[in-house]
Amino acid sequence: MPSKWVTSKGSVITLVVSGRNNIFLVESQDTVLLVDAGMGYMYDNLLLKIKKTGAVPSVIALTHAHYDHVENTLKLKEHFGAGVLIHLAEAEHLKAGVNPEDKPVKGKFTIEGENYPPVIPDIIVDDVYEAGGGIVIMHTPGHTPGSVSVIVDDEIAAVGDAMFNVFPGQAMVPYVMDRRMLLKSWKKLLDTKCGIFLPSHGRAITRQTVEKVYKKYA
């Protein structure tokens, strides 16, 4: 997978860390935003990779409050002095340092993960939030109630766990709280002009793949 994408307006999205989780740094004309904070063991490498870009994130946008996406949030907030952004539906989870629950697409049981250091968010969003510089935070629930996606110049979307592409051609998420709601979120994402969707797990997904999988499940 490429490690960098550039929009027609010059915004740069860099994959700063990959593996268990993908973490993206978005640099627009007047905003530097980190998408998710990753797991504890990733911290040193993540910090090094961010510093290598020369950019200083002013906002840490959390796609949702599962521990594998937020465990380093407090450390990164303190290191960079960045504001932490999360959706209203998961702000209390972040404050308490606990996971929202989720469940397999075809299963009945819930999954509970690990706790993490509590963080007081600075920016609590609802449906749509203009972060500046062509960056829009869009509510895309389904995987969790407060999942959000980061839309850059209406061309590229960092979608957190709203999509999943560990195996080629796959986009459906293995664990969701509400699949019907997830598909509505996919429709919202497809209503943008985005041609590339960047999941937190796996490779970039083309619009064509998302459209194909959406038709299968809708």
Image (cartoon, rainbow, N blue to C red):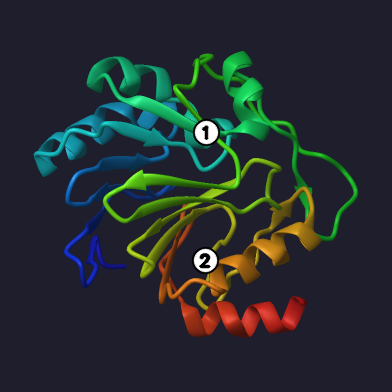
Q: Residues within 10 Å of mark 1 (few under 14, many from 20)?
A: many
Q: Nearer the viewer, residue 118 or 7?
A: 7
Q: Residues within 10 Å of mark 2 (few under 14, many from 20)?
A: some
Q: Residue at x 73, y 31 (%)?
A: 112
The type of residue carrying mark 1 is Ile
Q: Which residue is mark 2?
A: 165
Label 1 residue SS:
strand
70 relative to 59 in the view: left or right = right
Position of the C terminus, as image quadrant, is: bottom right
The type of residue carrying mark 2 is Asn
Q: Residue 116: x, y in percent?
A: 55, 19
Q: CA distance from mark 1 to mark 2?
A: 23 Å
Q: Nearer the viewer, residue 120 or 72?
A: 120
Q: Residue at x 18, y 33 (%)?
A: 56
Q: Say which quarter of the image contains residue 164.
A: bottom right
Label 2 residue SS:
loop
Q: Residue at x 10, y 40 (%)?
A: 52
204 relative to 98 in the view: left or right = left
Query: Which numbered dot is residue 86?
Result: 1
Q: Residue 8: x, y in percent?
A: 21, 72
Query: As displayed, is residue 6 above or below residue 92?
Result: below
